[in-house]
Structure formats: structure tokens, C-alpha cells
Amino acid sequence: MARLDINRAGEMEVFVRVIELGGFSAAARACNMTPSAVSKLVSRLEQRLGARLINRSTRQLQLTPEGCVFYERGIRVLADLEEAERCASSHSTPRGRVRINANVPFGHHFLLPLVPQFLAQYPDVTLDIVLTDEVVDILEQRTDVAVRAGPLKSSSLTARKLGQTRMMIVGAPDYLARCGTPTTPDELLAHNRLGANYARAQSGWPLRYEGEDLILPVTGNAQASDGEALRHLALAGLGLARLAAFQVQDDIAAGRLVPVLEHANPGDEEEVHAVFVGQGGYLPLRVRALLDFLVEKVRL
């Protein structure tokens, strides 16, 4: 029989956090502990088990074979524990605060319109929404879910795909009436090409023309910090912008924007993911509810 003064579930949770977040410092922030306390806890756990679980170096942590077994079993145990508590609790519905960070176009076109429906379905959940096209550090910002467009960097974060969207160049009818509608990449060079000034923005616009792949530099007289701001600049007739199709489909249908050079569109698409800390079933119920809702409702 295990000693009752050992909080084995607590030790297991801290150990799982260390592995998922890639280090003692990140796990300490997530668990409201100091890095030294996390390190000592893992050392005590190894001593009690009589096995080394992690090989430590100055750059990285690497699981030993025993550590891999303990981590995989630990995830299942913690998930079962949460499920047991949820079933036994009178408060077995999602409740609490969920902080979600999303890029501005996704936020305006999908997230914000879906908020009333989500909160009607889960009235005990509170959403804390931050919209920015900058990629934030989930741990530093204490974010539960972040919606990111484009390729994902390898990390300790888990991702669920929400969809993908093609990109397209558009301009307002009055701008095209003044400046002409370009039909070749060379003609596009004479136009005001509006760009983005956030860190993950592409350095140029990709095109495919007469069998050749091209990258056209963005050298317009205005830049903006997010895709929705670029859309509004294009709607105002300032120049051309390259935006996600979901952002402009209603504007195109209403005649407010016109697709440009579609025959030279390379067909590239941006994938959109919800990223979060945690794997498998080891997630707070309120976070899992939001993720499942987004996967079900978002149609890109």
C-alpha cells in the first residue's frame, strides 16, 4: 500500500507538465511553483521509484525508457482521475475562465460571431478573448487556446486543425477604375501593394505565371498590423491586398472587392489550428469544450 502522505497525483501532474512544456521553468510557471521546487520534486520522485526518468543537460531534457513509460501511463491516470472527479461532482459541466488568443481575421469572421452560441451552450464558462496577429507565448500570456494561421513550428504544444483557406489578391472597384486591373505580374509591379508589418508576414506575394514561380515584393505606401486592417485599406481604395479568401468572400459577393490575377494564383493555402498545452484527455473540461466547439462550428 502506498504511503498516504505522498501526493502521487500531484507529483505525476508536475512531471507530465515538465515533459509537455519542455523544461522545469515552464512547468514551474504553469504549476505556480519555483523551478528549484519542480526540480527537487522530480528528483524525489526518481528516488522513490528507484529509476531515472529524465536525462538532464544544459540544453534539453530527454526521457529515459522508464520515463517514457511513466509519462504515458501518467497521462492516462490523470485523465481517468479528472473523469472520476467530473462524474462524482455536482458541477460536472464546463465552468471557469478560458483565455483564448486568435489572429484578428479569424477573430472577426469566426470567433466573435460564435461567442454568443458557445456561452449559451456553456453558461458557466467565461471567455477572455485577445485578438492579435502577433504570435504570443502561450505560457507567458497564460493562454489556454491560441488560434494560429500558417505553418506550425515544432514545439511542446498540441494542435487541432480547424481548416484551411486559400489566399487571393483583391482590390476595390474604384481603385481598379483609377489604376487599371493588372493582368500580368509585370503590370502588378506598377500597383500599390499593401503589406503587413507583423513578424510572421510573408516577405512577398507568391505567383505562378506561365509555368514559373515568382515572389513579388510588397512595396506599397501603407502597412498594417493585422489582416482586417489591410482589408479595410483595400475597401477604402488605397491599393491591392493579398488576404485569406474567408476574409473577403462576402465583399466579393457584394461587389465591394474584386479578385485580381486569379489565373496567376499559385493556389497556396494557409492552415488554421487551435494550439494548446496538454495531450490526450488531460485537459480542463472548459478548455476541451471550447476546442470541440470550434472544431465542430468553424467552416473554412
Image (cartoon, rainbow, N blue to C red):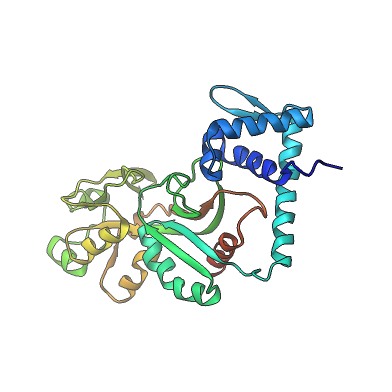
| Farthest-out residue, right | 1
Q: Quadrant of the N terminus?
A: top right
Q: Quadrant of residue 42?
A: top right
* Up-down relation of residue 242 to residue 75 (above or below): below
Q: Nearer the viewer, residue 102 or 91?
A: 91
- Residue 260: x and y, percent? 29, 61
- Residue 225: x and y, percent? 27, 52
| Farthest-out residue, left | 178
Q: Is residue 46 left or right of residue 2?
A: left
How many numbered discs?
0
- Residue 300: x and y, percent? 47, 65
Q: Residue at x 51, y 77 (%)?
A: 120
Q: Is residue 82 left or right of residue 168?
A: right
Q: Is residue 281 left or right of residue 165?
A: right
- Residue 118: x and y, percent? 51, 72
Q: Is residue 243 visible?
A: yes
* Up-down relation of residue 256 to residue 41 (above or below): below
| Farthest-out residue, front | 5
* Up-down relation of residue 163 to residue 253 (above or below): above
Q: Residue at x 69, y 67 (%)?
A: 89
| Farthest-out residue, top | 58
Q: Is residue 23 visible?
A: no
Q: Residue at x 31, y 71 (%)?
A: 251
Q: Residue at x 37, y 44 (%)?
A: 212
